[in-house]
Structures are given as C-alpha cells and as structure tokens.
C-alpha cells in the first residue's frame, strides 16, 4: 500500500514539474503571461515537456511548458502552451509555424487571452411542439404514413 502512495506522489511531483499553474497564479499573472506565451497544436502524444522546451530554446528562454491532458484518462490532448521569459521570443517562435517536430507539422500561434463572458454558453432554440393535429405513424422506416384507427 505504501509503495502505491509513493508511486502516486512521484507521479504528482512529475506533473507539477511540467509547469501547470494553479488557479490563483493564472489569475494574478493573466494577461502578462499570455503576451509571453504561445499555443502549440498538433503535438505528438508521446512528447514530453523537456523535448518541447529543447525545441523552443533557440527562440528564447523558456519558463514553462504545459502539455494539456484529459482530466479523466490522463492522456495528452495533442496541444501545449509554452511560456517564454520575453515577449520577443513569441515573435521568434511564431516564425516556426508549420515546422516539423517528431514527423508532425506543428501549429504555432500566439496565445489568446480569454475574455470572461465572451463565447461560453449559447442558448439553443427549442423546437416548437405540435399541439394540435394528426401526427402520422411511420412503419418500418418507410416515409409513407400508415393510418390505423384501432
């Protein structure tokens, strides 16, 4: 039992080393960090944060690499965020758009700042329910109505 706890602690420490920010850090540094960060899409699922850090080091000093994972399964979702020390490194990194990494063409763009209340929930229009009239029954997927009075 203790061995399993040690394994879980090791995995959580490894996850923390990837550089994922906690909620309070993300709110405090929000727009400033977004100006120094890039979105990297089409990332190979087996890629580690260290490999991405090594790939983007020529652009500038890398502070943090966050590879997004599915919360339930823990599998990578195929994209990552890279935070640099300077804003100039972002312009250098965007020039690497469509560069090949692990036999995949990366999609690199500057990270967008999320605007609260923009996007999000959209109300869907509901279909009006028929109140009156006859609604025919279809038989065996046939589109001709079959009338059965009894």
Image (cartoon, rainbow, N blue to C red):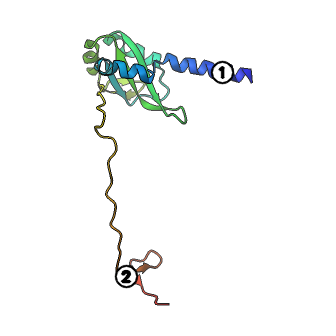
Instruction: Examine the rendered structure and indicate whether residue 98 appears above or below residue 93.
Output: below
Query: Which quadrant would residue 144 be assigned to in this image?
Result: bottom left
Callout 1: few (<14), some (14-19), or many (20+) C-alpha neighbours within 10 Å?
few
Circle on res. 47: none
Question: Looking at the image, which residue sits at the far bottom?
Answer: 150
Tell me: 75 left or right of 60.
right
Residue drawn at x 28%, y 37% as measured from the top left: 118
Q: Nearer the viewer, residue 53 or 133?
A: 133
Cα–Cα span, label 2 and label 1:
65 Å
Tell me: 82 left or right of 72.
left
Label 1: element kind: helix
Q: Residue at label 2?
A: 134
Q: Residue at label 1?
A: 7
Label 2: element kind: loop
Callout 2: few (<14), some (14-19), or many (20+) C-alpha neighbours within 10 Å?
few
Instruction: Examine the rendered structure and indicate whether residue 100 appears above or below residue 58.
Output: below
Query: Which quadrant would residue 147 be assigned to in this image?
Result: bottom left
Question: Looking at the image, which residue sits at the far right?
Answer: 1
Residue 61 place in picture, x, y as percent: 35, 9
Query: Which quadrant would residue 108 be assigned to in this image?
Result: top left
Tag count in the figure? 2
Residue 146 place in picture, x, y as percent: 43, 84
Q: Nearer the viewer, residue 53 or 145?
A: 145
- Image quadrant occupied by the N terminus: top right
Q: Nearer the viewer, residue 61 or 133?
A: 133
Contact (Cβ within 8 Å) of mark 2 with mark 1: no
Marked residue nearer the N-terminal end (2 or 1)? 1
Residue drawn at x 35%, y 75% as measured from the top left: 131
Closer to viewer: mark 2 or mark 1: 2
Residue 14 place in picture, x, y as percent: 55, 18
Q: Nearer the viewer, residue 3 or 60?
A: 3
Residue 34 place in picture, x, y as percent: 31, 21
């Amino acid at each position: 039992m203790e061995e399993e706890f040690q394994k879980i602690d090791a995995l959580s420490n490894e996850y923390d080393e990837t550089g994922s920010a906690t909620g309070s850090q993300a709110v405090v540094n929000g727009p400033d960090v977004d100006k120094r960060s890039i979105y990297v899409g089409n990332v190979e699922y087996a890629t580690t944060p260290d490999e991405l850090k090594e790939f983007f080091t020529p652009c500038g000093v890398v502070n943090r690499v966050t590879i997004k994972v599915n919360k339930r399964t823990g599998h990578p979702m195929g994209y990552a965020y890279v935070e640099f020390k300077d804003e100039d490194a972002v312009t250098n990194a965007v020039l690497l758009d469509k560069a090949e990494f692990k036999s995949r063409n990366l999609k690199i763009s500057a990270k967008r700042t999320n605007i609260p209340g923009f996007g999000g929930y959209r109300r869907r229009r509901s279909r009006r329910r028929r109140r009156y009239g006859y609604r025919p029954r279809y038989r065996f997927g046939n589109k001709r109505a079959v009338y059965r009075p009894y």
